[in-house]
Image (cartoon, rainbow, N blue to C red):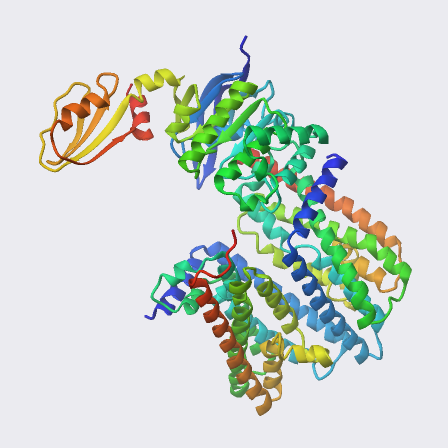
Amino acid sequence: MSVRLVLTAMATAARRNTSDRSGVLVNAVFYVVVASVLSALWRAAAEANGGEIAGYTMVAITWYALAAEAATVSLNMRTIELICDDIASGAVESELLRPAPVLGVRISMAVGAALPRLALCVAVAAVLGPIVGGAPPSTAGVALAMPALVLAVTCNLVAQHAVASMAFWARDVRAIWFLYQKIVFVLGGMILPLQVLPDDLERAAMVLPFMTMAYVPSRLASGHVEPELLLLQLAWLAVLLVAAHAAFGAGERRLQVVGG
Amino acid sequence: MTETVIATRSLSKSFAARGRTVEAVRDISFEVERGERLAYIGPNGAGKSTSIKILTGILHPTSGDASVLGLVPWRDRRRLTMRIGTLFGQRSQLWFELTPRQSFRMLAAVYRMDADIAARRVAELGELLDATELFDVPARTHSLGQRMRCELAACLLHGPEIVFLDEPTIGLDLLAKQRFRELLVHLNESAGITIFLTSHDVADIEHVARRAIVINHGAVIHDADVASMRRTLLSRKLIEVTFADEVPAPMLSGVDVIAHTGTTLELAVDTAVRSVRDVLDDVLGERRVIDITVLDPPLEAVIAEIYQS
Amino acid sequence: MSPVLATMRTAFAEAWSNRAAFWTQVTAIVLNDVVWIVFWILFFRRVGPMRGWDRNSVLVLLAVLATGCGFTFGILANARRIGWFAADGDLDAALALPVSPLAHLLVRRVDSVHLGDIGFGVVLFLAVGDPTPARLAVFLFGVAVSIAVMTGFLVLTGSMAFFTGRTTMADMGFNAMMILSSYPVDIFVGASKVLLYSVVPAAFIAAVPARLIGDPGLGDAVALVVAAVVFSGAGWAAFTLGLRRYTSGAAWTRA
């Protein structure tokens, strides 16, 4: 798939998303609400524990929450459901009529759609964060969190495409998006820092790909300058791309042999 | 000199459905020459969409061979799609929330077209399809007829050699259908694009195609040029007349009485033997008429005719 | 049988007709709810009691929320779609029937995916809520208020689409309501806490009912009744005004 096609697909989707002004507003308000709630919860938790929880100060945990919510709010967590619907309706079949890899175009467009939302969340966080929790614990951490957020969103979307490929084989798997979302919430570090989990579960979460989707950028933004986490994201992204390519490709071949 | 652009040989496709095997396409063989306008017709469930999916590479056949522009569709799908265009009436190539022009930019990247060439092509298509003013408003605001013109532009953007159209006029009003058919004929005559059209609308055969392949229950049951088909098969007309008073059934050559209920007559007229005008002159005479309808025979009747002949 | 009950029965029959999908969806939502329990257990294991809330009281909150949401999104499934109907001009079918349009719309559709929430919520309460007859009665009262407030709020925000032609308010209202009602209200302080008792009545949806179960008091009970009346009334009024606009032809519709 050419670079030009990737960039065009991303730009097309980004334009489509930003043209819906009311959708942009809803997203911004939603981000403010969820980020405020999560940071309030964890600040209250830190306060109840002498000012610190699981190694995060009240300021650190605020920035953790802001980054975690930015990573998840900027993409549509129901992407799995939408892909399943497109597979069931035959829309994916029609995409086979173009001389471009279906999965590649879809992922590019999904990432393109998410990036303007991510940018908006980051802009809102830049204003909200200092008001609610104070200045970020580390500028280096925040700087590293930027590419980490882009990688987090990309890993999440690629994984959702891999999971949604089940729809090539089974009907009524749309509801799986609920489960996927909750796994990302807990094992991805979206609603709690992974250090809060019991030791065994924390160790398991650290070796699963979900931690790339919220924990990594959040960890960096909360002042823990661990650049090796970015490499981990890149490695997982490669694995997830291979998995999605294999699953979607098998699904397309099944479509061609068995029909829609 | 003609060139074969589509060739199928004993093409078959079966599906497993709820424990039994459904033969969607059975032993289909035909060839299409470059520049032909072909209507591939049949009732719902006849196997038209399955055939077109095989020819465009979306579906593998169970057995048999096919080649489109010298390529095996299901093996060389990516290369084939660079040279064919597709328009499915029920599916859109355009992105709903974007303007068509923005969708064309995306498609230009998909088909690896040079941006300047693509822009020139969009301008040409806009003029040809009389759709330029539609290209800069979001697709979701278009009427169906307007959308289909933009879809046609999307399908032609990369200069395909063959255009596959699956029920493209479905849902269009009469005027829009007529206009669409005229466009297809024009594209074929001016640019030499081969037209492969599936439809269950008889008017699509009459106004677009020079040749028709009739398919039913997955098999080809008739393959002939439209002119001869019209002469031998579509030469029937149905006339329904309601009179104010009771009338006897007419005894005329070339006219079959399908129904007669005292004041109403339903007649099937073989226009090769006797014209509709003559029949009406004889039947109506000086009688008082309440209602009169002249109909083409339904497609099912045409196909039944093909079975019997 | 009243038209409303007949419609509800038909909606159930429709949801029940695809058994495989029904059970898949119910299972998914139950698993989804289990994950929330896991989260709160992990949270309080690490944090301990916090601002008057502990693990058990939050699980009771979850029980009220799940049961209330299950009923609102499962049985009154169109409550969250009022905005879409108004924006798309899709009320004609309901208006053509000899029934109250709002009541008919609310019961017209059953979303089986949320029916699992109802069972889950009740079982959760029975497991962790120390279900004495008195507490059970308060639980049911709290769930009834939760349903009334949620439905009223969704209809209120959805009805804004009659006037604006867009579902923006409905989307924002739904999202805010769902997120804010899932947490113990006392984690918020000051102005934001006031918001949760007024603009987005999230406090009345689960936190206050859960507090009432744990610590019965007249103040909370009266507040819940008032909230239920105010928000159901506001929803009904907004819908009625909006409908008048719709039927006059002045309402916005999408091209």
Image-based side of C175 in relation to A53, left or right? left
Residue at horizontal 8 percent and vertical 35 percent from the top: B246
Residue at horizontal 58 percent and vertical 30 percent from the top: B127
Vertical relation: B120 (above or below) B274:
below
Q: Position of residue A127 (x, y in %)?
A: 80, 66
Q: Position of residue C61 (x, y in %)?
A: 62, 77
Q: Position of residue B156 (x, y in %)?
A: 59, 28
Image-based side of A5 in relation to A220, left or right? left
Closer-to-camera residue (B80/B95): B95
Closer-to-camera residue (B187/A3): B187
Position of the C terminus of chain B by quadrant: top left
Q: Quadrant of residue C48?
A: bottom right
Position of the N terminus of chain B by quadrant: top right
Vertical relation: A195 (above or below) A249:
below
Q: Is residue C119 visible to us here?
A: no
Residue farthest along the bottom direction in this orientation: C218
Residue at horizontal 49 percent and vertical 36 percent from the top: B89
